[in-house]
Image (tube, rainbow, N blue to C red):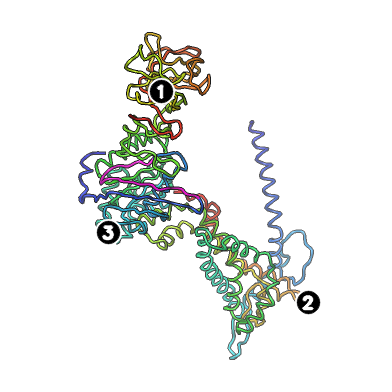
Amino acid sequence: MTRRADLLESLAAHAVVILAVCFSLYPILWVVSLAFSGSTSLEPQVLPIPVEPTLEPMREVVGATRTGPDGAEIWLFGRQLLNSVVVSIATAVVGVSIAIPTAYAFARFEFVGRREGMRLLLATQMFPAVASAVPLFMILETLELLNTRTGLVLCYASTSVPFAVFQLRSAFEAIPIDLEEAAMVDGATRFEAFVRVVLPVARPAIAVTFLFAFMTAYNEFILAATLLDDELAFTLPVVLQRFIGEYDARWDLFAAGAIVVSLPVMLLFYQVQRHMVAGLGAGGVKG
Amino acid sequence: MPASLWQTLSAPFRMVSVQAKQLIKRFGDTTVLSGVDLDIPDGEFAVLVGPSGCGKSTLLRLLAGLERVSEGTIHFGERDVTTLEPRERDIAMVFQSYALYPHMSVRKNLEFGLRLRKTDAATMAARVEEVAKMLDISHLLERLPRALSGGQRQRVAMGRAIVRRPALFLFDEPLSNLDPALRAQVRVEIRRLHDQLGVTSVYVTHDQVEAMTLADVLYVLEGGEVQQRGRPIDIYREPANCFVAKFLGSPAMNLSEVELRRESVAQQPERPWFAGQFPVATPAAFAQLEPGRRVFAGVRPHDLTLATDGAGDLELQVEVVETLGPELTVHGKLRAGTSPNSGPDQAYVAVLPAEHRVARGDTLALKVEHLHLFDAVTQRTLRC
């Protein structure tokens, strides 16, 4: 191929990529622009550039405070961010901890109901979260866990387990059984082989599963909106939604909030992306 | 590998004999092993050989404790290990896939078993160094398995087995993932290793070259049963049945189903039997066999020679000639009239010295130097 043809091909490829990037970035730029514009309404604008740049919406979202029952001032946003992070981490920890042994059993052991059990787990994924909102509300009410992080974590963890089991089972199945057998011949008990060989080899898949559970909990809105009605117990998605009321829509606050809420997840993604790639290729672990 | 390194092994390896009695293994309704006996003396190198699905790997896994026996007993020396866990059996195993722990360096792989046995750090380091030198992998100790070539992984897998100084080595087709040149080299090393360490070994393979070259004692398995046990050369010379005859030896033995007939006793008094239309004189040893009996007449390709006087036992119509350096493998059909009852065009193979000029279309007069006879019904050898 000539130099000229090379150049043309390269230009065409870049054009396609740039177009794709614009297409996906445009709405995000719009949100960014809105967050710094100081305009409270949605005004149609072609270029997402703030007319009068200001940090006011950001300050208003992050700096939100409230007077607590004891009269002391509480940093509301900080409290809500903490709620989100704690609930999401706890959900991921609880969900993955339950899913690991379950998935291993499904991957390695023969037992009555193995196939049916897996199907049942999958079937639970077919129901929308709303379907379980009311029963969960009633259960939590009985347990006096409404408006608590614990209550939310229990609900989230129970919904995250099936998917985590499904994902980890494939990961465990992809690990050659020879590795465990070699460990057992080398002197390990089955449990030691699991802890010392299987878990480290499955680490990328576990990291990805953890991230998924974390993100699902972090972004979850419907259950949180149903089970929480105290501002102090809110998680961030509920906070965001409250900016758009029936009579009053503060799009600037919504946009600012959206950016602040996304930051922790973006940081987390950045941290674990190395594992993500390894996790996607988790089948390639053959010694 | 310098011999002095072998002598640096400070403590001698222990050895055990292996006895298995009437081992039966069933998976659901399928019987994989139906009454297998093993008797492997201290320090012997036993090879289990057989085609895919003959139960040889299952047998090895029973010895390792990775599968439970359905019936029967296994003893290592005096110890009944039938129901013991793998870790309690004092064995080491080299897997076909090598099964190196992918998240651990070579050093950590070698140390793994020692760590589980709470070996102190100094001993562990010394043992690892020793084995690494022995197998020439010292420079690889800090690498991860994925950074090693197939041959290097194989050595590490061997090292991991040796470093623990087990009483019994188990090998599950350890060479099948290596290219042929390397396979031959490692095969020799495994045998040398065994001669030096003297540890009782059980080796599973479907490769008859490995089986013949490595074994002190060879078990040929088929259909979940031991077809024959013995020294490789004895089994090669005196196969117990048609299966063993066909399975061991390359190219495989030519087998033809024929009817015994008495002819021309006057002409060849010392070889009084002919095998039907397959006009081969049977050795005097078969003199008691009654005429009319149906048998399989087996001739190894290497037991055929060119008849210099032109009066051979068989006439072979040459179809394909393969030149393999010192030998020619000649594929052809037995010529009508000289062919056995089973049909006029039986395929036959002969191996001849390369100095013979043989071309496609030639008709060769071949002499049978050694004839095996098997009963047509039981397929067992007819020895007298």
Chain under callout 3: B
Considering every residue shown, the one lying at the far bottom of the view is: A70
Rate crowding at label 1 as few (under 14), some (14 to 19) or many (20 or more) other CA atoms within 10 Å. Answer: many
Q: Amino acid at mark 2?
A: Glu
User: Is A210 left or right of B235, judged from the image as shown?
Assistant: right
Residue at which label 1 appears: B301
- Residue range corresponding to the magenta coloring: B30-48
Judging by the rendered image, the residue that carries numbered circle 3 is B121
**Residue A40 position in % (x across, y down):** 75, 72
The secondary element bearing badge 3 is classed as: helix
The first of marks 1 and 3 along the sequence is: 3
Viewer-side residue, A24 vs A183: A183
Give residue B121's position: percent from left, percent from top: 27, 59
Position of residue A41 relative to residue A143, above or below, is above
Nearest the eye: A208 or A176: A176
**Closer to the camera, A63 or B276?**
B276
* Residue furthest to the top: B309
**Distance between the Cα atoms at labels 2 and 3?**
70 Å
Report how far apart the C-alphas of labels 1 and 2 lie in the structure.
94 Å
Estimate the x, y position of residue A80 in percent, counting from the top left.
Answer: 60, 77
Q: Do callouts 1 and 2 mark residues in contact (Cβ within 8 Å)?
A: no
Same-chain check, marks 1 and 2: no
**With respect to residue A145, does A251 lie above or below?**
above
Foreground disc of the pair 1, 3: 1
Examine the rendered structure and indicate whether residue A47 appears above or below residue B338.
below
Question: Viewed as shown, does residue A213 lie left or right of A198?
Answer: right
Residue A267 showing in the rendered view: no
The amino acid beneath tag 3 is Ala
